[in-house]
Amino acid sequence: MLAQIAISVGFLLACGLVLAGLLLLAEKKILNYGTCHIDVNSGRKDLAVEGGSSLLSSLAENNIFIPSACGGRGSCAYCKVTVREGGGMIGPVEEPYLTPEERQAHVRLACQVKVRRDLRIEIPDELFNVSRFRAKLVHKKPLTHDIVELRMQLLEPGEITFEAGQYVQLESAEYKGRDSVMRGYSISSVPSDKDHLELIIRRVPDGICTTWVFDHLQSGQELHFSGPYGFFHLSDTDAPLICIAGGSGMAPIWSILRDMKEKGITHRPATYFFGALTRRDLFFMDEFRQLEKECPWFSFVPALSKEPDDSGWTGERGLITDVVARRFPDASTHEAYLCGSPGMIDASVAVLRQNGMPEENIFYDKFS
Amino acid sequence: MTPLADMSLFASFALIFVSAAFTDNILLARFLGMCSCLGVSKKVDTSLGLGAAVIFVTACTSALNYLVYQYLLLPLGLDYLRLITFIVVIAAFTQLVEMIIERVSEKLYNSLGIFLPLITVNCAILGISLFMLNKPYSFLQAFAFGLGGGFGWFLAISLIGAIRERINEAALPRGLEGPGITLIIIGIMALGFIGFSGMIKI
């Protein structure tokens, strides 16, 4: 009996060890691509990396951070880069995300390109300024029932340089069997506050990252993010501004307006339309009223769409797009800055176009 | 009927292949390998890719497991460990093949290799390796059984994939979309495959 047990256990053990050893050996022998060189933007950077992993992670190891929300699973299609040489065939995972024009232009998903040989790639120049930051959460302040403000102190690197309106990718930690993911959030703090960063985050029911932020993240805890990313920022024209954003979409607008104040840009009148459902969804009211008082060029228009009639609210009522249309029947000389859900952006763009605003004057940051 | 051992090699080979593919179809008669079938049969291309990978793996692993069983497990008196041993052998084999394919041909890897991790723990493959032991097969016959079983699964998933692609545009009741209608399709096809049963008895 004992011998029987010993034999069976010994056999299974030997079986497992032999096969595992075989696989390890095979991995070393077969999947060894040696050192590969990645040429970024025609000689701007030449990286020597160990072949075998994805282009996305190889670049991240060398401190070049391509935006990615899904963490390399090939489902967000944010990590598009141009691979001039050595990328190999387009794989079945990335196929659905590439348009015929992109294929023509050698665009690939960085997470799906494996570094097997020397590569020649092109990325937007801005991405060279992106770093991965380690930061400590200073506070998590509830702004409404489903929106919080995070304030972080940067630890490593200790300072960030960005343009008001840009976003960062926050990395959630693993919790309760859910993997770490990266999600983009606009920066709400001002660029002059170099060693801190603030984000405004709205709870997404069942969202992996926001659930982590709301239920697991504690003050004093360390966290990671990369950035800055994005092309949403104040133009250098003299056109007056119409800003439209609701909920956590306020973040980039809040940053841009205060940045204008700090830089002394007073010749561009700005109106911020803050759309919300009811009074409990409003926040930063005092701050905006204060800004309005200090800056004669700025006016603040909060509007509620679902506030009960008898609640004593004396401000604007109705859909934010209707309010904008009422206040600016002629918007042809203005510029618009929009941030919010795709539905709200599309509706706002339609209204602004109708009121004469050229499409190239409308800037937006869509998030879903 | 002549017993298998008395037949010519080719005849027994063909008979085992056909019976494994049709009368004993692993997917439609035994209902094994259902999870990957439901997941991947949305399109014909991917169905064909996964099916081809399954043919390759079942043929190779049934031969491999036959050797392991005859020359390791039986002599050591450990045939009750066949299930766990087979799983480990299959998993290691698919991993190894994936690595080799990845290195050898990118084209083959994109059409076949990406499915290998999916079938590392596919029950159809383990099932074929286990069912093969119920009959007194020789090494080559075991290989034929694996090849036929894999082909049967390939046939079934490509048919299902083609039907699903056809009904993709059809307006279905919401509760039936996706896996629901697929299970019904598989059920109807299984009824059809019952027609083969009893045609060959080995």
Image (cartoon, rainbow, N blue to C red):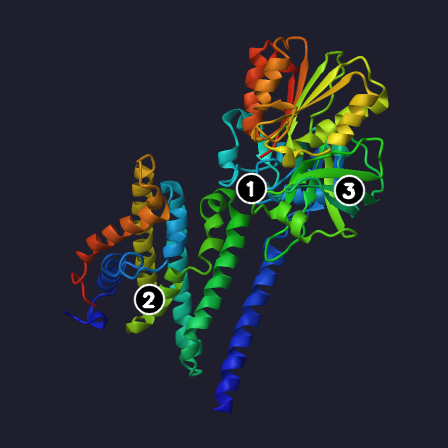
Q: In the rendering, at what x and y percent does residue A166 appear?
A: 72, 30
Label 3: which secondary element: strand
Quadrant of the image containing the N terminus of chain B: bottom left
Q: To which residue does mark 2 refer?
A: B142
Q: In the rendering, at what x and y percent does residue A251 appear?
A: 71, 32
Give the chain letter at badge 2: B
Give the chain letter at badge 3: A
The 10 Å Cα crowd at callout 1, few under 14, some 14 to 19, many 20 or more, is some
> Extreme left residue here?
B1
Q: In the rendering, at what x and y percent does residue A302 appear?
A: 67, 25
Residue A74: mark: 1
Label 1: which secondary element: loop
Asked if the residue under mark 2 is in contact with the one under mark 1, i.e. CB atoms within 8 Å, the reply is: no
Give the alpha-carbon distance from disc 2 to disc 3, as whole Å: 66 Å
Residue B50 visible somewhere in the drawing: no
Number of numbered callouts drawn: 3
The 10 Å Cα crowd at callout 2, few under 14, some 14 to 19, many 20 or more, is many
Residue type (three-letter) at the residue carrying disc 2 = Ala
Quadrant of the image containing the C terminus of chain B: bottom left
Residue B112: mark: none
Kindly report which numbered mark, 3 or 1, lies closer to the viewer in this rendering: 3
Front-most of B91 and B8? B91
Q: To which residue does mark 3 refer?
A: A151
Residue type (three-letter) at the residue carrying disc 1 = Gly
Asked if the residue under mark 3 is in contact with the one under mark 2, i.e. CB atoms within 8 Å, the reply is: no
Residue A171 visible somewhere in the drawing: yes
